[in-house]
Image (cartoon, rainbow, N blue to C red):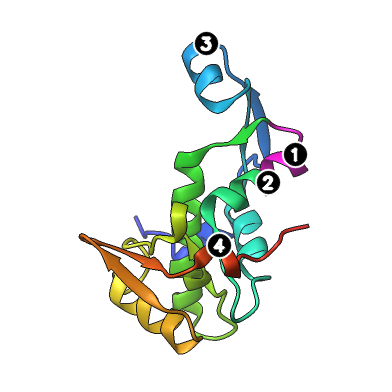
Amino acid sequence: MTRKSYTEKLHDSKDMPVVKELTDPKAIARYGGPRILIAPPLAYDEIMAKVPQGKLLTADSIRDHLAKKHQADFTCPLTAGIFMNIVAYASEERGVEKTPYWRNLKKGGELNPKYPGGIEKQQELLEAEGHTVIQRGKRFFVQDCQDKLFELE
């Protein structure tokens, strides 16, 4: 059996987007409501592609934006992380017309070690765009990230 390329995974929407109702009281309390969105990989690619040079996004802001768009209480954090990585690897696989995945950060402006090339490549790409990356312990962050966030409509 042949493995799908990242580009094929990016375009495989299955039955998404889908909003499901949670019934577990602990999960509902944790996420602030019962309506969970599972958005397709292309939804993340579309948003990540809009971020201009010099601006940044966080995974949380993308998830919040998608949840509002689909009248859900929150977007599944597990699938969101997987699908943002698919966007990054599909972008690298294409080699042209890249989605600037490196402008998408984890909570608090942290770099994502799971992106292609790891922290080193993301840091290199961000610094080439004028951002300053600082190290705190074993983790890396964009300095003054909050001042550079891209506003999603």
Question: Foreground: 28 or 149?
Answer: 149
Residue at image coords 44%, 65%: 5
Residues at badges 3 and 4 in contact (C-beta under 8 Å)?
A: no
The image position of residue 19, as x and y in percent, is: 67, 30
Q: Which residue is mark 4?
A: 146
Eye-nearest disc, 1 or 3: 3
Whole-percent x and y of residue 14? 61, 44
Q: Earlier in the sequence, mark 1 or mark 4?
A: 1
Identified at 64% across, 39% down, the residue is: 15
Give x and y (percent) for residue 133: 37, 75
* Residue located beneath label 3 in the image: 25
Q: How far separated are the C-alphas under marks 2 and 4?
A: 20 Å
Mark 2 Cα shell of 10 Å, populated few (<14), some (14-19), many (≥20): many
Report how far apart the C-alphas of labels 1 and 4 lie in the structure. 26 Å
**Which residue position is annotated with label 1?**
70
Q: Which residues are magenta?
A: 66-72
